[in-house]
Image (cartoon, rainbow, N blue to C red):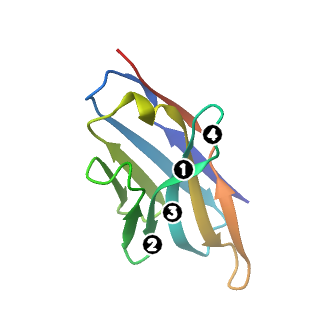
Amino acid sequence: QVQLVESGGGLVQPGGSLRLSCAASGSIFSITTMAWYRQAPGNQRELVAIITSGGLTNYADTVKGRFTISRGNDKNTVYLQMNSLKPEDTAVYYCNVNLYVTILQRRDFWGQGTQVTVSS
């Protein structure tokens, strides 16, 4: 089995910064993509940022230029650096990892979610 452990959420003032981390461990053959999603109350879960095994990245238009997704040197950890935070960034942030657990079995895994609140 695969476990994802998230950390780094919290309360921050508008204009502030936070860094989220997500570490994947367990039966990992290879990782294809790592991503961050978020879900605000009453809204659907939305993709915030994604990074491929080759290092390609893509961002939601609402966070471009403010958020940066990256992977750790171990390639099993993904980070989301969030700068210039706005109240509308308030949400539960979820880590998502798409990976092969064996050479043939590809699956999606989700973290437990971490609350980010942007408020003065």
How crowded is the residue under tag 3: few (<14 C-alpha within 10 Å), some, or many (20+)?
many
Q: Amino acid at mark 1?
A: Tyr
Disc on the earlier residue, 1 or 4: 1
User: Decide: marks 4, 3 in contact (CB < 8 A)?
Assistant: no
- Which residue is pictured at 66% across the width and 33% down the height? 42
Residue identifier under label 2: 52
Of the two numbered discs 1 and 4 in the rendering, the one whose residue sits closer to the viewer: 4
Q: Amino acid at mark 2?
A: Thr
In the picture, measured across the screen, residue 105 lies left or right of residue 99, that is: right
Of the two numbered discs 3 and 1 in the rendering, the one whose residue sits closer to the viewer: 1
Residue identifier under label 3: 34
- The x and y percentages for residue 24 are 56, 56
- The x and y percentages for residue 4 are 60, 50
Disc on the earlier residue, 4 or 3: 3
- The x and y percentages for residue 69 are 37, 56
Please state which of residues 67 and 31 is positioned toward the viewer in this rendering.
67
- Which residue is pictured at 32% across the width and 21% down the height? 13
Disc 3 to disc 2, how far (Cα)?
Answer: 7 Å
Q: Amino acid at mark 3?
A: Met
Q: Amino acid at mark 4?
A: Asn
How crowded is the residue under tag 2: few (<14 C-alpha within 10 Å), some, or many (20+)?
some
User: Decide: marks 3, 2 in contact (CB < 8 A)?
Assistant: no
Residue identifier under label 4: 43
Task: Return the residue found at the far bottom.
Answer: 104
How crowded is the residue under tag 1: few (<14 C-alpha within 10 Å), some, or many (20+)?
some
In the picture, measured across the screen, residue 17 lies left or right of residue 62, that is: left
Disc 1 to disc 4, how far (Cα)?
Answer: 12 Å
Disc 4 to disc 3, how far (Cα)?
Answer: 22 Å
In this rendering, the count of numbered labels is 4
